[in-house]
Image (cartoon, grey):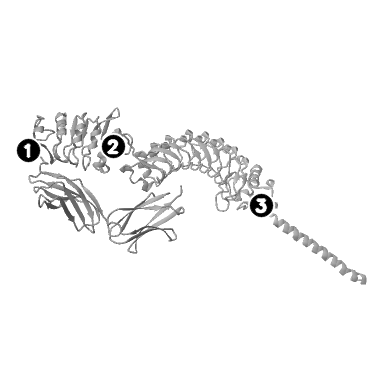
Amino acid sequence: MHADEQLTSPVVTQQQSLTVMTRVVVLVMLIAVSSATATRAQFVGCPLIDQITLQACKVLEKLFYDTDGYNWRNVRGWLRTNQPCDWYGITCRSSQWPRDIIHIDLSGNNLTGTLPGDLAFLEELQSIRIDNSGPGIRLRKLTGQIPTTLGDLEHLEVLTLGNNAFTGTIPAELGNLSNLRELSLEANELEGPIPERLGQLLQLQRLDLGGNSLGGPIPDTLRNLTRLEYLNLRQNIFTGVLPVWLGDLNKLRFFDASENQLSGRIPEELANLDALLWLSLADNNLEGSLSLATATFAAGINNCYLQGNRLCIPNAPPYANLDQVCSLYRNNTCKACEGPNCDSLESIYANTGGATWIRNNGWLASSQPCHWDGVSCVDERITHLILPNNGMTGTLPASLSSIKSLQVLDLSGNDIQGPVPAEYAALTSLDTLNLSDNKLTGALPHQVAILGAQLSNCNLSNNAGICVPDSPEYVALDTDPICHLQLRGDCLGNDLVAISELKAVPGERSIQLTWSITSSSSKITFFVEETQPQPKTIGQVQVASEAQTNFTYTVEDLEPGRYSFQIRQVTANGAYRITGPVTVELYNEGLVTEKVYPNPFSTEAVLQFTSGTYGSIDIALYDLLGRRIQTLFSGTPPLHQSTRIKIKSDGLSAGTYIVRSHIEDRPASSQRIVFVRD
């Protein structure tokens, strides 16, 4: 090597090194920039896409850009690979190229912007699911109108666009989707009526339109959706009445039309929905009396909400437990049947244990007494009351005499006690009176005897304690027997006395019976009889002197339970009269919280409890953290007697609370209650 070459070679090497280093730095910078923008720069472009057609790729690309795809929660594969069938939320049909996109599921993926109508070019689509619900995406919603072109997707079976901010009306074109099984548009900002063309969706099983501003009446065309299992119309502004054809949707399992402006009555036809598990008609303007058929149906549903209307809930036994299974607060109680005839029928129902009759369909529960068991009418006037062998107990009410049109009264073969009311003489249209085979007592009132002597058919036989006195006014009727009763000189009632104020006071495993009489007779013996739980005579009291008017008998060694007693007075000649029964509950030792009503409550609730042991009781309201909020009761309540206290909502926040009770500082019971604000 020459000397000059040796001198210049190092210089060349340094220049080359500098050039290489410069190039490396530039390359590193380019790599860094490329890496920083990879999500935007790596898209291979639709012309290079594999698996699907160029047009299908363009649709997906537009969907990505129109809905701010770079901020989706999951962008796996999107605009990065050339295999879109593997992109997040995309499903293709397995077939030869080109593959058809059949499912798009981007629910909960943080989409915002507008939904492109170009989706209609994906002609084989079977489902679109873009429900934007989920944590952290409340403010990121799809907006604008639902594209009308979606109605061209003839293979579409599922369209779910809930929890977005779509505006405008529901496109009528969606009614063209003849294969649609699910349409969910809940929680948007849609308005206007439900398009009548949705009634063409004969395969529809789920229709969810809740949480919008849709209005107008529920269109009759929806009656065609006989496959419907889920119908949600809640939180809209629908008006008009509930259609009776809803009862024809016999596959319906869920129906919610709460928080609308629906009015009128609840149609009885809803009782035909045997498959229904959820019914909510709360917070509307529904009114009218709740029919027995509807009440019975509602009581059998797992979830039933009727609160916040102007419904009339009859205060009749068939409705007694409805509030235990169906939310009814902010409605009214009423009588289903109004008018004097209804009052008379109500009195015989109440007096003779109507709730336990063998046949009592319709009684007190409908506004049409002519359809009640045993009642017949002509021109809406009651003409027949026929309830033989019907398990009737108690006494005959005098008010039955106000049914002036009554022609036939047959209450035979029951266990009715007491006298025949003298007021029955006012039944001037009566042709047949049959009160035989009961336990009626006392002398037949003269006015009734006059009527009975004139009737075509009158039978009061086989009532061991009733008779017709052999006195001048009865003899003057020139009829013997009267109503199958012979005139008797020793007619019951000559030696009998009137018993008043029969009371039963519970003690610890004992019940004290007390009664009094207005006048005394040494010819009378009082027999104490238990009628419940087991009919039997348990003792007797002999009148000590004619001055004695007050009597006491104590039944001891009793187990907790419900007991009924009656007093039978018997004269020396065997005549007798029986009082009406008195019933009392003997509780277990301790505290029995019977109920809190209403529950939930909005203003105040009532707690009803009974103590079965002596001692100081403390009842207080606690929150779920165990903090004492209110003292509800502190003291010693009457033993075995129901006590009611009010729970005020003052200062309470909406939520769940616990009512806890203590006897002598020992825990006794607890119960949850719910406070809601109006």
* Label 2: how many Cα within 10 Å (few below 14, some 14–19, many 20+): some
Amino acid type at image mark 2: Asp
Q: In this figure, what is the number of numbered marks? A: 3
Secondary structure type for disc 3: loop
Secondary structure type for disc 2: helix
Q: In this view, does 211 lie above or below 613?
A: above
Q: Picture coordinates of residue 446 (x, y %)?
A: 14, 34
Q: Which of 158 and 186 is in front in this view?
A: 186
Farthest residue in the top direction?
A: 379
Q: Is residue 370 left or right of residue 90?
A: left
Q: Nearer the viewer, residue 524 or 132?
A: 524
Task: State how far apart marks 1 and 2 are (Cα).
Answer: 38 Å
Q: Picture coordinates of residue 348 (x, y %)?
A: 25, 39
Q: Within the image, what quadrant is residue 641 found in? A: bottom left
* Label 1: how many Cα within 10 Å (few below 14, some 14–19, many 20+): few
Amino acid type at image mark 3: Arg
Whether residue 63 is visible here, answered yes or no, is yes
Q: Is residue 345 above or below residue 57?
A: above
The residue drawn where x is 68% and y is 46% is 46
Q: Is residue 81 left or right of residue 180?
A: right
Residue 489 shows which numbered tag? Answer: 1
Q: In this view, does 208 lie to the left or right of 433?
A: right
Amino acid type at image mark 1: Gly
Residue 343 shows which numbered tag? Answer: 2
Q: Is residue 536 left or right of residue 264?
A: left
Q: Is residue 562 above or below residue 481?
A: below
The residue drawn where x is 24% and y is 35% is 400
Q: Mark 3 points at which residue?
A: 80
Whether residue 359 is visible here, answered yes or no, is no
Q: Which of marks 1 and 3 is in front?
A: 1
Q: Picture coordinates of residue 53 (x, y %)?
A: 64, 43
